[in-house]
Amino acid sequence: IAGCGRRAVGMAGAGLRAAARCWLLCGGHGGPQAASSSPSCPGCGPPGPCPHCPSAPAPAGGADLSAHLWARYQDMRRLVHDLLLLNPAAIYANNEISLRDVEVYGFDYDYTLAPYADALHPEIFCAARDILIEHYEYPEGIRKYDYNPSFAVHGLHYDIPKSLLMKIDAYHYVQLGTAYRGLQPVPDEEVTELHGGTRHIPLYQTSGLYGKGPSIRQFMDIFSLPEMALLSCVVDYFLGHGLEFDQAHLYKDVTDAIRDVHVKGLMYQWIEQDMEKYVLRGDETLAVLSRLVAQGKQLFLITNSHFSFVDKGMRRMVGPDWRQLFDVVIVQADKPSFFTNRRKPFRKRDEKGSLRWDRITRLEKGKIYRQGNLFDFLRLTEWRGPRVLYFGDHLYSDLADLMLRHGWRTGAIIPELEREIRIINTEQYMHSLTWQQALTGLLERMQTYQDAASRQVPAAWVKERQELRCITKALFNEQFGSICRAFHSPTYFSRRLVCLLTYRGAFTFYPRRTPLQHEAPLWMDQLCTGCMKTPFLGDMAHIC
């Protein structure tokens, strides 16, 4: 899965340039100036003379050593304050991919070709809430809850037996401060106790079909936001009123109510009745599809939505001849079973909307097909391997099997990524993150001083580091933080997006090399300044 973002690196201020030269002369490794015979800065190696560094060795201990540590702290604060990251466009990819090699492009419809406005979420929430009250006989008091768009983020996990909504990182650990029961935070100590003395979530609990283990569900698609909000509100009501409930029953009822909104066609009715309100940016959809066709690419559409709904939306966004852009159109595909179940054959839909009974031996351009399965699709089209690039919004039901079992290239559509990148590019975020990294480096390097007075200084730094983490997290979402990161680790959800509109057909996306823990960082946005290892800092100091 490739990724699209806007981020670049720049630095401003003569103080930073001077500090950069100081680093290279006194402690750099690998740059052309690193060959200088100048001794290293204190904290990086043997102390030595430098106009920007202490000229004397570190004191042996006591109050003088404490003052020395705080002086290093202030030096690092000044350096980080001068760091400024700029914002020209850039592309990030998880794997190297050349668009020249991609011959076939596939798309889901909802939230992929058809981007929906956030105004749809409160409608889904309220409709499902009313279904719970009117059809599942839940308490009338639940109707007081309204949809809160700022409560949850994508990719969270729900521990059904414990009624815990939480964020888990890529290593199966619950991120501190991101566990909620209902609408109330659960202390970290209680989360650890509930999971048997650890924050680790065993793989078997989360590795079931499409992220749905026996007791833990991960919320992946766009429609899961109102589901998480409703689930939390209902649990909050029951707990707040001292009502006993079975966690599994409550979870299933809420999930079924959300499903009813889709199955009963309520969502489709809202969108069809007010396309202007709910469907966004049709011009980009037409531009992307037209460009791909002009480049000789083959296109297909696989969606769970019914044809009349897709047809109305595509006519608005692309025009009445939209079907001529696609070599294959499949509706009501019943994903994710479309990708795993061999039993359902394709059926052709005629112009009157009736299903034909004849056996499908080829998939024709301009025709509409229903149901089917991926194995017949591959056999009839021979579209296999990395020459196929498929886009969807659900990382599991749209993308996982296609990549792991069939070798297709896949692109995840993540609307929130645009907002997160805007936050990442703010001065507040950049300075906070860089100072966190610098402080982490200081903590690592200065822990050699173990006398009583010295140990009090890093303790204050640890507290400040945790406060900075909480501040940075709240920039994205006060409860759960970024959808892509859990402090220093990636989240379980973390994936990226490809933007096609501005890239020519022969463009190659190259993955960014992310340094491992034992490697020196090579890019400023991956820099732990406290480690004092920046091979190209001198050159990068002149970027503006």
Image (cartoon, helix red, strand yellow):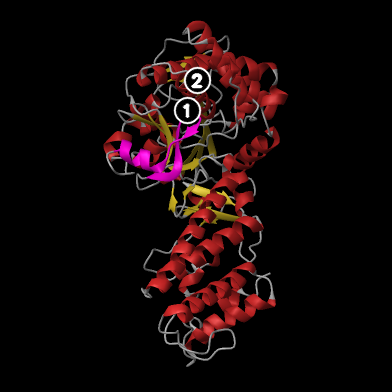
Tell me, yes or no, whether the two marked residues, 1 and 2, touch with CB atoms within 8 Å.
Answer: yes
Q: Which residue is more in the foreground, 169 or 436?
A: 436
**Residue at the (52%, 89%) spot, across then down:** 55
Q: Mark 2 packing: few (<14 Cα in 10 Å), some, or many (20+)? A: some
Q: Earlier in the sequence, mark 1 or mark 2?
A: 1
The mark found on residue 237 in the picture is 2
Q: Is residue 175 magenta?
A: yes
From the viewer's perspective, tell me whether residue 86 is left or right of residue 41.
right
Q: Which residues are magenta?
A: 174-195
The mark found on residue 105 in the picture is none
Report the amino acid beneath label 2: Tyr
Badge 1 marks a residue whose secondary structure is loop
Residue 170 visible in rendering: yes
**Residue at the (54%, 40%) spot, across then down:** 414
Q: Is residue 308 magenta?
A: no
- Quickly name the residue at label 1: 182
Residue 320 percent coordinates (x, y): 68, 23
Q: Quadrant of residue 378?
A: top left
Residue 498 percent coordinates (x, y): 55, 46
